[in-house]
């Protein structure tokens, strides 16, 4: 089974990008004002949930792993994010929770599945790694 090599920062950026896409699409779908403050207000609980989840799963060890990193990041982002939304007076309707679980699950686990299918990222050619590098 091949493993994708991805630096931890790359994994964090991909996960955060999934969250930001969720927030931007959701706010646009509901015709909410496109202000940076509005985006930040909606995104911060999920980004905080992501940070806690990545620490809890020790994501820096295997950022592209589906289990435990991907599943932990996904479920922790939604669970902690929703709890923080409640504490901060934001809405958490059942439909919103379901959409968040579906969207973030698809994208946060999805990029990991793609990375897994692509296999390890090589810095050099296969010939150079096997000692058969061509001389030109």
Image: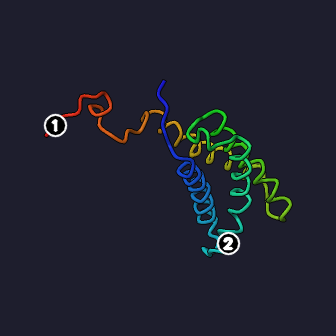
Q: Is residue 135 above or below residue 27?
A: above
Would you name the residue on which mark 2 appears?
38
What mark, if any, has residue 62 been given in the picture?
Answer: none
Distance between mark 2 and mark 1 Cα atoms: 57 Å
> What is the number of callouts on the image?
2
Colour scheme of the rendered structure: rainbow
Location of residue 47 by image quarter = bottom right
Which residue is found at the position 65% from the left and 71% from the top? 32
In the image, is 114 to the left or to the right of 81? left
Residue 21 x/y as whole percent: 57, 58
In the image, is 5 to the left or to the right of 97? left
Mark 2 secondary-structure assignment: helix
Residue 124 x/y as whole percent: 32, 40
Considering the image in quadrants, where does the C terminus appear? top left
Q: Is residue 66 above or below residue 108?
A: above
Of circles 2 and 1, which is in front? Answer: 1
Residue 126 x/y as whole percent: 30, 32
Q: Nearer the viewer, residue 27 or 82?
A: 82
Q: Earlier in the sequence, mark 2 or mark 1?
A: 2
Neighbour tally class for label 1: few under 14, some 14-19, many 20 plus, Cα within 10 Å: few
Would you name the residue on which mark 1 appears?
135
Location of residue 106 by image quarter = top right
In the image, is 108 to the left or to the right of 55? left
Q: Residue furthest top?
A: 1
Location of residue 74 by image quarter = top right
Q: Nearer the viewer, residue 57 or 33?
A: 57
Labels 2 and 1 touching (C-beta < 8 A): no
């Amino acid at each position: 089974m091949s493993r994708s090599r991805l630096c931890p920062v790359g994994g964090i950026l991909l996960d955060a990008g999934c969250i930001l896409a969720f927030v931007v699409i959701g706010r646009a779908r509901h015709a909410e004002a496109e202000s940076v403050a509005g985006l930040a207000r909606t995104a911060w609980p999920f980004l905080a949930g992501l940070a806690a989840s990545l620490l809890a799963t020790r994501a820096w060890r295997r950022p592209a792993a589906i289990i435990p990193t991907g599943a932990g990041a996904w479920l922790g982002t939604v669970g902690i994010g929703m709890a923080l939304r409640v504490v901060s007076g934001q809405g958490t309707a059942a439909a919103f929770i379901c959409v968040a679980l579906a969207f973030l699950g698809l994208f946060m686990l999805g990029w990991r599945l793609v990375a897994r299918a692509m296999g390890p990222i090589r810095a050099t050619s296969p010939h150079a790694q096997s000692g058969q590098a061509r001389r030109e």
